[in-house]
């Protein structure tokens, strides 16, 4: 049951299921609302933090989860409630800045991971990039905020992304290992708590190395 304090908050910093329910005329990528009920079960079981409703931690976590939900599921960035669309920029590890249109076209995985031996964003589409990691993490690749270091307008926070590597990653065998990334992000927000820019800092090499640690059975069968 939501508290009065929570319901007075802007929609985009409330729980993402509430945002999804307010979907009048939204252009969903698959033609229907996304369903996070399965993911929410694992979040409830595996999250290390239960931030109090209305706290800065809960507000920041909801805002980022809503951005990720919208970037993944709403094809038209003009309908993303979580950002100031005409100002929005996103970067990773001090690299190139991307617009909301770039995110909608390429997908967050492609923009985050770029080019390496283990992953090539140039050969993946928006849809295929999400399928690759859905296959690797069939129970979800979960995200939570762990600590807020500074408040608005530059909200700086620590986070963890994790999942159990139970499915194959491309041609690499699953290890059953818990794979976790930790990082720091800075979200510059407007007066009404919409994201104007988002900077992420994390080591994606460790993440990709863990996904290729189980060996490549496809290659070995053909040697």
Image (cartoon, grey):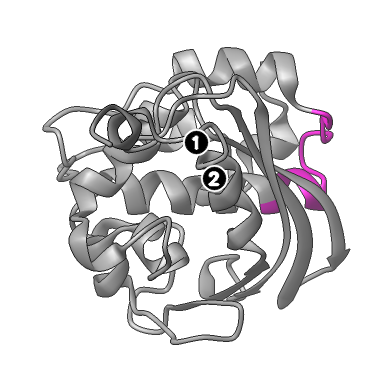
Determine which quarter of the picture holds residue 150.
bottom right
Q: Quadrant of the N terminus?
A: top right
Q: Mark 2 and mark 1 in contact (Cβ < 8 Å)?
A: yes
Does residue 13 appear anywhere in the picture? no
Q: Residue at x 74, y 51 (%)?
A: 159
- Residue 49 spot, x, y in % from top left: 83, 32
Determine which quarter of the picture holds residue 220.
top left
Q: Nearer the viewer, mark 1 or mark 2?
A: 2
Residue 52 magenta: yes
Q: Residue at x 84, y 34 (%)?
A: 52
- Could you say which is closer to the camera, residue 111 or residue 37? 111
Q: For residue 4, which numbered disc appears in the image?
A: none
Q: Which residue is mark 2?
A: 65
- Residue 42 spot, x, y in % from top left: 61, 16
Does residue 45 appear anywhere in the picture? yes
Q: Secondary structure at mark 1?
A: helix
Q: Where 114 sits versus 16, above or below? A: below
> Counting other residues with Cα less than 10 Å from the Cα at mark 2, is it few (<14), some (14-19), or many (20 or more)?
many
Left/right placement of residue 6 relative to residue 74 reads right
The main secondary structure of the magenta stretch is: loop
Residue 111 magenta: no
- Could you say which is closer to the camera, residue 166 or residue 35? 166
Q: Quadrant of the C terminus?
A: top left
Q: Which residue is mark 1?
A: 16
- Residue 175 spot, x, y in % from top left: 57, 24
Q: Residue at x 29, y 31 (%)?
A: 218
Q: Where 40 sits versus 74, above or below? A: above
Query: Where are the magenta residues, as a range?
Result: 48-60
> Counting other residues with Cα less than 10 Å from the Cα at mark 1, is it few (<14), some (14-19), or many (20 or more)?
many
Q: Secondary structure at mark 2?
A: helix
């Amino acid at each position: 049951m939501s508290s009065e304090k929570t319901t007075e908050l802007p929609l985009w910093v409330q729980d993402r299921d509430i945002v999804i329910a307010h979907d009048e005329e939204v252009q969903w990528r698959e033609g229907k609302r996304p369903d996070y009920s399965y993911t929410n079960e694992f979040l409830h079981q595996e999250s290390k933090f239960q931030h109090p409703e209305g706290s800065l931690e809960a507000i920041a976590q909801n805002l980022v989860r809503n951005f990720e939900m919208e970037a993944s599921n709403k094809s038209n960035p003009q309908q993303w409630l979580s950002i100031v669309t005409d100002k929005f920029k996103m970067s990773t590890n001090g690299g190139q800045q991307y617009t909301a249109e770039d995110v909608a076209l390429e997908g967050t995985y492609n923009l985050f991971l770029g080019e390496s031996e283990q992953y090539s964003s140039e050969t993946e589409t928006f849809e295929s990039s999400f399928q690759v990691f859905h296959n690797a993490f069939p129970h979800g690749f979960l995200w939570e905020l762990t600590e807020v270091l500074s408040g608005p307008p530059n909200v700086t926070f620590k986070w963890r992304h994790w999942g159990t590597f139970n499915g194959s990653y491309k041609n690499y065998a699953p290890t059953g290992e818990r794979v976790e990334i930790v990082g720091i992000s800075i979200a510059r927000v407007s007066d009404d708590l919409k994201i104007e820019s988002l900077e992420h800092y994390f080591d994606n090499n460790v993440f990709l190395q863990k996904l290729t640690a189980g060996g490549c059975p496809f290659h070995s069968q053909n040697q």
